[in-house]
Amino acid sequence: MKFEIIRERLVEGLNDVMKAVSSKTTLPILTGIKIDVTGEGVRLTGSDSDITIQTFIPAEEDGKQVINISEGGSIVLPAKFFGEIVRKLPTNDVEIEVTGNFQTHIRSGKSEFHLIGLDAIEYPQLPDVKDDHMFSIPADLLKTINRETVFAVSSSETRPVLTGVHWEIKEDELVCVATDSHRLARRKTKLESLPKDEYSVVIPGKSLNELNKILADTKDPVEIVMTSQQVLFKSKHILFFSRLLEGSYPDTSRLIPSEHKTQVTVNGRSLLQAIDRASLLAREERNNVVRFSTIGNGEIEVSSNSPEVGKVEEQLPAEKIDGEELKISFSAKFMMDALKAIDGQDVVIEFTGAMRPFVLKSALDDSVLQLILPVRTY
């Protein structure tokens, strides 16, 4: 195997596939990156057996020669060393040659490295995903959906299914829900190309976070293929496979209140900043609790009290307050995460009582819903 490649393009490809490589794998070969060279270009693959990322660098892009291929072949190189070497090479021209016993020579300018590779035959095959149930989402919309839901997954492995986001296709709508049993994030999206069958899968939150790091902020379509055990995201030159979580996701629709006793409409950015300030003194406390109350005159008060540190109170004008007076306490972190997901627009908050879950929505549309359980402070 022997080829020359532009270093910048190789670094881009490595940055993508390295996101799937873990040093904590039980299969030693998965600490490496698989390189396949054919007449069309170079394919790089990284995997930790939960996530597999494959990227393709074509020999020619936009009429420019990116790779000169002298001889095709495959090799697995240690990801940690190969990635570092390529990043630090002195020129933008890189030559990689594999000789007997998987000896790999990496040359650039006056610099030459020798790495011992592994036989690519030992590397696990990619999952076999058939394109029967495929639909597509623009990349920027997919990133937004992930950003609005993934933060609410559970970080505890006691209920593994809650560490993922529940994706459900029903009635021409994609519904994505994440909950850690103290809060819930839901995003509904109408799409044209959804499969007619109903689908329900749970995608690990970690996978969706890594996917967001790779996707570009463009309208380019990302094709999504779901099977019983895997989901595949296909964008321009990248394949991103993730295993699915087993187990049935709880029915969260019962948690969302259908009525409310108090409704507050307030500027989301102002409320976020006020809670951020109030949490400065609450951070020392175990669960970083902030209090929220309606105080008449169309105003709300955000406050926190830390016996060892001090207290803070701040009044904010509300756009509108309907219903009963209210005092409620909640985790500042949960509330700030929810407000960030709604992204600075005017927010409608619906309360059904001081100890009942409350709902946040954008005043402009109800495609995004956040639900938070309050904290008992008396």
Image (spheres, rainbow, N blue to C red):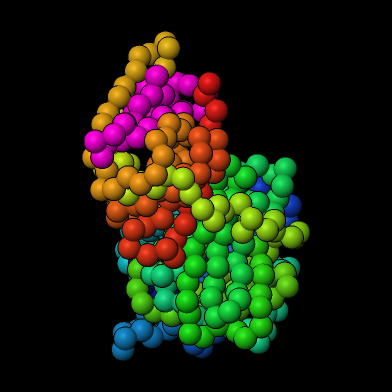
Q: Position of residue 125 (x, y in %)?
A: 70, 73
Residue lying at 38% horizontally and 29% vertically, measured from the top left? 279
Residue that appears at 50% across and 44% down: 352
Give percent across and percent down for residue 333. Answer: 44, 37
The residue depicted at 42 percent of the width and 84 percent of the height is 59
Q: Position of residue 221 (x, y in %)?
A: 43, 80
Location of the N terminus by quadrant is bottom right
Q: Is residue 79 magenta?
A: no
- In this picture, which residue range is highlighted in magenta? 278-305
- The answer to whether residue 71 of the structure is visible from this angle is no
Relative image position of residue 31 (x, y in whole percent): 63, 56
Outermost residue toward the front in this view: 323
Q: Is residue 187 above or below residue 374?
A: below
Image: 50 above or below 317: below
Residue lying furthest right in this view? Answer: 247
Q: Is residue 160 visible?
A: yes
In-front residue for pair 320/84 = 320
Look at the image and say whether residue 295 sits in the magenta stretch. yes
Residue at the (60%, 67%) spot, across then down: 167
Q: Which picture quadrant has residue 328? A: top left
Asked whether, in this view, residue 5 is left or right of residue 354, the answer is: left
Give whichever of 102, 205 is nearer the camera: 205
